[in-house]
Image (cartoon, rainbow, N blue to C red):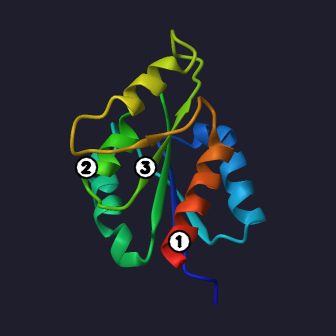
């Protein structure tokens, strides 16, 4: 039986998987059980809300959300859970600001909706930060 996932990785589109692969690789290298889901804040908001609401009850401890352009996914997830949320701003061919739009959207959350932000395309750092959070929870 596979180990219970501790980290949930969300992307808004299958096209984001490639830029988030470093996150998945880092979690694997650290033997951290995780799951990957594709759920869009814009195209399937009810599915995102349900995922976030149910995450803690399913045993997840940290959520990582990769998002480009408007980057609504990390903030929306943070609005529906008390778990730590790490946002990874992603570059997009459609972005006029080469990922800076996503960075600003993730970093500028309103009071009461915290989201940690790593660098643009910083998927590996998101996994490392998740590992550090998990280490604190286990101590």
Q: Under tag 3, what secondary structure?
A: loop
Q: Which of 37 and 76 is in front in this view?
A: 76
Q: Which quarter of the picture shows residue 71?
A: top left
Residue 133 drawn above or below residue 21: below
- The quadrant of the rendering that contains the C terminus is bottom right
Q: Under tag 2, what secondary structure?
A: helix
Name the residue carrying label 3: 39
3D distance between C-alphas at marks 2 and 1: 20 Å
3D distance between C-alphas at marks 1 and 3: 18 Å
Mark 2 surroundings: few (<14), some (14-19) or many (≥20) residues within 10 A: some
Mark 1 surroundings: few (<14), some (14-19) or many (≥20) residues within 10 A: many
Q: Quick one: which residue is furthest to the right in this view?
A: 29
Q: Quick one: which residue is furthest to the bottom in this view?
A: 1
Q: Is residue 27 visible?
A: yes
Q: Which mark is residue 71?
A: none
* Residue 15 locus on image (x, y percent): 60, 37
* Residue 119 locus on image (x, y percent): 59, 32
Q: Residue at x 60, y 18 (%)?
A: 93
Name the residue carrying label 2: 79
Which of the two discs, 1 and 3, sits closer to the camera?
1
Q: Residue 6 carries which label?
A: 1
In contact (CB < 8 Å): disc 2 and disc 1: no
Mark 2 / mark 1, whichever is N-terminal: 1
122 left or right of 53? Answer: right
Q: Under tag 1, what secondary structure?
A: loop
């Amino acid at each position: 039986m596979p180990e219970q996932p501790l980290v949930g990785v969300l992307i808004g589109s299958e096209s984001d998987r490639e830029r988030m692969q470093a996150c998945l690789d880092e979690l694997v290298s650290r033997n951290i059980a995780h799951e990957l889901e594709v759920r869009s804040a814009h195209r399937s908001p009810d599915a995102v809300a349900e995922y976030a609401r149910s995450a803690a009850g399913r045993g997840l401890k940290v959520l990582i959300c990769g998002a480009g352009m408007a980057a609504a996914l990390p903030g929306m997830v943070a609005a529906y859970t008390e778990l730590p949320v790490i946002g990874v701003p992603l570059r997009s061919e459609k972005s006029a600001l080469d990922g800076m739009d996503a960075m600003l959207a993730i970093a500028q959350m309103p009071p009461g909706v915290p989201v940690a932000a790593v660098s643009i395309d910083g998927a590996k750092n998101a996994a490392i930060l998740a590992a550090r959070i998990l280490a604190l929870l286990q101590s």
